[in-house]
Image (cartoon, grey):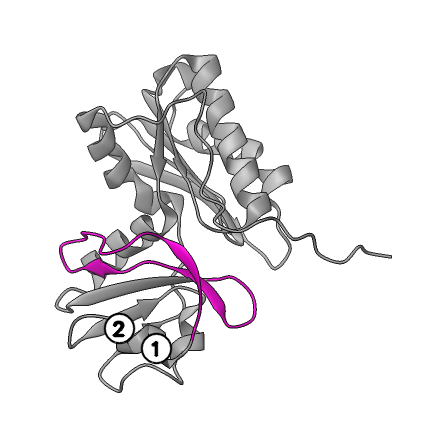
Amino acid sequence: MSQILCIETTGKTCSVAVENSNGQIFTVEEAGEQFIHAESLHPFIEEVLRIASMSPSDLRAIAVSSGPGSYTGLRIGVAAAKGLSFSLGIPLIAIGTLELMAATVIRKYPGYETYVPMLDARRMEVYTQTFRADAVALDDPAPVVLDMDFFTTKPGASLVYFGDGASKSADFAGKRDIYLPDIYPLASQMVTLAGNRFSQGDFADLAYFEPAYLKEFVPGPKAG
């Protein structure tokens, strides 16, 4: 019922989702080793509105996953979200990518004390944040190089590490901990969070909002 268009482009999956006035959620997404966001995002938006039998004028807000994550993916997703928000005259909602992942895993895997999303940031580094079982964040999102000290400072007797960087933690974390590397942020998971933010009037400042890159952009090698 939120009628909020959700955009998630922080990783390899480009995804959009929308909930119509009847409470049905529709999503369009595609994953690949090569980033397809620049070519696919706007066609995906048009497609999800078409299958939901909605027009842009039906939307009440635009929600975007605000990072951390891929620099290029963030730039593309946020630019599209801000452009739509401005042109339609509707609010912009920013949802932290790690918060989005944590809310999803806490709902699917309840009963643990501490939840630690991890997004791959190359080599032994991850973007990460720590959450309690009630989804309250215990620290700020940050890029971290994994070592034993990182794991020994985590609170709680039972921990869940998840995301595409979680496999890097297996050599350090305790035997009682679980690892869920196949957890990715998706637009369909944003719908409830976006609806809550809308109800609370928690909107981003359209003029000044910037995604949470956390690290400076480092270009990859040129082809050819």
Secondary structure category for the residue under label 2: loop
Range of magenta residues: 120-146
Coordinates of residue 10 in the picture (x, y in percent): 49, 48
Tags 2 and 1 touching, CB below 8 Å:
yes
Coordinates of residue 45 in the picture (x, y in percent): 49, 31
Asked which quadrant contains residue 209, the reply is top left
Does 184 lie within the magenta span? no
Coordinates of residue 51 in the picture (x, y in percent): 42, 32
Does 143 lie within the magenta span? yes
How many angstroms separate mark 2 from mark 1 (CA)?
6 Å
Q: Give, as a three-letter code, the residue at label 1.
A: Asp
- Residue under label 1: 149
Is residue 215 visible to the viewer in this orientation of the structure?
Answer: yes
From this view, report whether residue 118 is shown above or below residue 72.
Answer: below
Q: Give, as a three-letter code, the residue at label 2.
A: Thr
Tag on residue 153?
Answer: 2
Is 199 situated left or right of 125 in this image? left
Image quadrant containing the C terminus? bottom right
Asked which quadrant contains residue 223, the reply is bottom right
From this view, report whether residue 12 is shown above or below residue 165.
Answer: above
Coordinates of residue 23 in the picture (x, y in percent): 22, 33
Residue that protrudes farthest toward the right in the picture: 224
Residue drawn at x 34%, y 73% is 150
